[in-house]
Amino acid sequence: MELIFLGTSAGVPTRSRNVTAILLHLQHPTQPGVWLFDCGEGTQHQMLNTAFHPGKLERIFISHLHGDHLFGLPGLLCSRSMAGNPHPLTVYGPQGVREFIATTLRLSGSWTDFPLQIEEISAGDILDDGLRKVTAFRLEHPLECYGYRVVEHDKPGALNARALKAAGVTPGPLFQALKAGKTVTLADGRQINGADYLAPAVAGKSVAIFGDTAPCEAALALAQGVDVMVHETTLDASMEEKANARGHSSTRQTATLAREADVGRLIMTHISSRYDDKGCQRLLAECRAIFPATELAYDFSVFPV
C-alpha cells in the first residue's frame, strides 16, 4: 500500500496546500485498487496531477461532513459519471452523507450513470473484501466523525518446494493444496501436511487514517500498533487548549499518541493555514521531539505503508 496526499490544509486551502483528501493505492499483484479518504473542495483537480483519476476509485471514505472534508465529492461524482465510467463506487460516511449527495445532485440537476452505493456507518468493522479489513472508530469532534483502520490480512508463508521435492512430491496441483496448508495423500499412501512445509505467515500492512479529533479514548485503539498513523496536527503545542475546544489536536498530543500506540511512523497533516513553511517545520520539530519517526505531509507527498 502507499498513501498519496492530495490535500493537507485545515479548514481552507492555501497557495501550497489544498484541503483534505488522501488516496490509498492498494498495490496488490492481482487485485490492485484505489481508495479515497475524504474529498475536500478541489480534490478532483488535485487528482489530475497524479497517475490516478476518479474512474479508478472503488471506495470513498468520508470522516465527517465538514466542508473541507466533503465539498469536493459532488463534483467528483459528476465528473466520474460524465466520463462514462461504468464501474461501481461505494461511499462510506457518517449519518447525513446520503442526504448530502442526494440533495446536491438533485438541486444541481445532476446524476450518476454508474452504480453508486452509499453506506452510512457506525463504529465497528465496515468492510472485509477478503484481502483487507476496514474498521471505523468514532472520534471526538463537534460533528459525528470517524477514523479508519485498514489492515491487510496476513499472507501465507512461502512453500518449501525443495523439501517437498526431496519428500517425493511432484510440483503441480498438490502444491496448491499444500500452499493452502491442507493435508494431501500421495499415490504411495503417505500423508503430507502443508503446514509443515510453509514458512511463517507474512504480517499484513496496516494504516490508521484519522479524521479531525481532539484526544479521545478511541484514538489509541484506532492507532495501536499500525505501521503508519495519519493524524491531524492542526495547531502547535502552545495553542493546545484552542485546538481541543474546536475538536482538534496539537502537535504534542498527536506525537504522544503515536508513541503510546507504538506505531511505526507518524505522518502529520491537516495543518492550519496560519503556518508558513517555517512554521510547518516548527510543527514537525515539536512532533519529532516526542516521536522521532514523524514525517510532514505536503500536497502530492507519497509515503509507502
Image (spheres, rainbow, N blue to C red):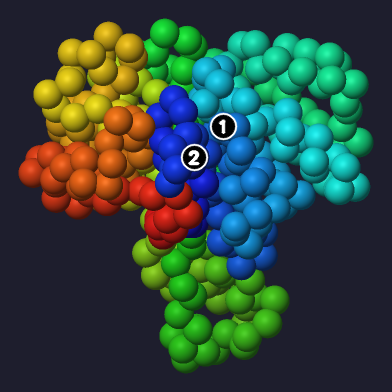
| Residue for point 19% across, 30% down | 236
Element type at marker 1?
Answer: loop
Element type at marker 2?
Answer: loop
Question: What is the count of numbered marks?
Answer: 2
Q: Amino acid at mark 2?
A: Asn
| Residue for point 49% across, 12% down | 144
Label disc, if present, on residue 188 of the rendered structure: none
State if disc 2 and disc 1 touch (CB < 8 Å).
yes
The residue beneath circle 2 is: 18
The residue beneath circle 1 is: 40
280 or 229: nearer the eye? 280
Q: Is residue 261 visible?
A: no
Q: In the current view of this chain or complex, which residue is farthest to the front?
A: 15
| Residue for point 27% across, 36% down | 275
**Mark 1 → mark 2, Cα distance in angstroms:** 8 Å
| Residue for point 47% across, 34% down | 13
- Vertical arrangement, residue 87 with respect to residue 221, above or below: below
Q: Amino acid at mark 1?
A: Gly
Query: Of circles 1 and 2, which is in front?
Result: 2
Q: To which quarter of the image does residue 252 belong?
A: top left
- Vertical arrangement, residue 80 with respect to residue 62, above or below: below
Q: Crowdedness of circle 1 by 10 Å Cα count: few (<14), some, many (20+)?
A: many
207 or 211: nearer the eye? 211
Give the quadrant of the C terminus.
Answer: bottom left
- Locate residue 179 relative to residue 107 in the image: left or right: left
